[in-house]
Amino acid sequence: MKNKRNFIAELRTLEMPYSKCFTKKGLRNALFSQYLQTELKPNLKLYFNSHISQKEWKDGLAETHLDIPENTTASRNEKVAANVVSLTEIESKAQDIQSAFFALVRNNKLPSEYYTHTITDTPIFHTLVAVKQQIERFQKGVFEEMGLNAKEYAESFTEKLIYNLKQMQIPELSNAVIKDFISEKENIQFDIRIILGENVPSNISLFYEQTKEIADNSLSRYLEQQPQQVQQDNKKTEEEIKSFEDLFYDPNLIHESLDVLRNAEPPLIDKKGNWIGRPLGAICVWTDELKTRGIMKRADGKMLSKYLSSKIKGFSISESMFRKHQQRAQKDYCLQFKSAISKIKTT
């Protein structure tokens, strides 16, 4: 519950690209799943809020505002001494809390309750930021790339955009971003007029209109092909994976991947490959991290349940477990797995 509360609190205040997409439960859960796999970090806001209530802070700021002298503006030639206005009681308290927080962090004495995961460390966040920047560069092209062929410029953009979005492996979110881009038809023209005035050169306006139309058409065709493509991809995955070894892109990495379970603290399998650990959900955390690192294929719960149970002696797990949040396993093994799996060298 604590992780969920912190996640929602950050999501509400974070300036996140395409934040409206995460009003949908499925996409919000996908983001939350990645959130739980991020490294725990000291959270100043959480520490601060535990030492000063919202009401106390709000009332203190109101008093600070009332205490400001009416004439605080210096003329251009005046030199104003620093710290002329002394700190108010609430400002002094806030400064002390902040100093105490950083002292605890430096000395590794900050209580664990003030460590949180962060949305900004998730692959989804990084991808959406990169996509937003890519779209902005495309729009700026109306000023900077006038010598290019409109068709080539637009197709190069859509190809890279689709590639970046596919890295998330969340078709619903990728499609939502694409639909948002396609629906954006007027704002760029407004931006052009702000920068260049009402009399926009016709060649600039025409170049943008041409590239935008080509990009929109290309992306619309991509969206139309999605349902069929998803079915083909699912069928291809089922055809490719016929054994435990097939779950991995490179079978040579299987031994190192299983070593992560052997060397975990406490260990989950013994030297002979027998399951000796708890909770079962630790396997779900392990497979999620292997997928994130590009070591394991995106197999569904049914295949994972079948082939993991056949490989690990004394182990059995329901496919539904791979669709659930494994809170205890996340707490016990997430950071261990991230560290160990990051050291596996892929080609």
Image: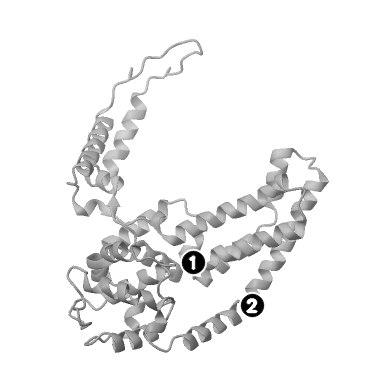
Point 61% across, 54% down: residue: 135
Among the 4 quarters of the image, the one containing residue 283: bottom left
Name the residue tied to disc 2. Answer: 225
Q: Secondary structure at mark 1?
A: loop
The numbered dot on residue 168 is 1
Is residue 15 something one can see in this rendering? yes
**Circle 1 crowding by C-alpha within 10 Å: few under 14, some 14–19, many from 20:** some
Q: In the rendered structure, which amino acid carries the disc numbered 1?
A: Met
Q: In the rendered structure, which amino acid carries the disc numbered 2?
A: Gln
Left or right: where does residue 103 sit relative to residue 31?
left
- The mark that comes first in sequence, 1 or 2, is 1
Examine the rendered structure and indicate whether residue 216 appears above or below residue 149: below
Point 52% across, 86% down: residue: 235
Q: Which quadrant, please, contains the C terminus?
A: bottom left
Q: Position of residue 228 (x, y in %)?
A: 60, 82
Point 47% across, 54% down: residue: 16
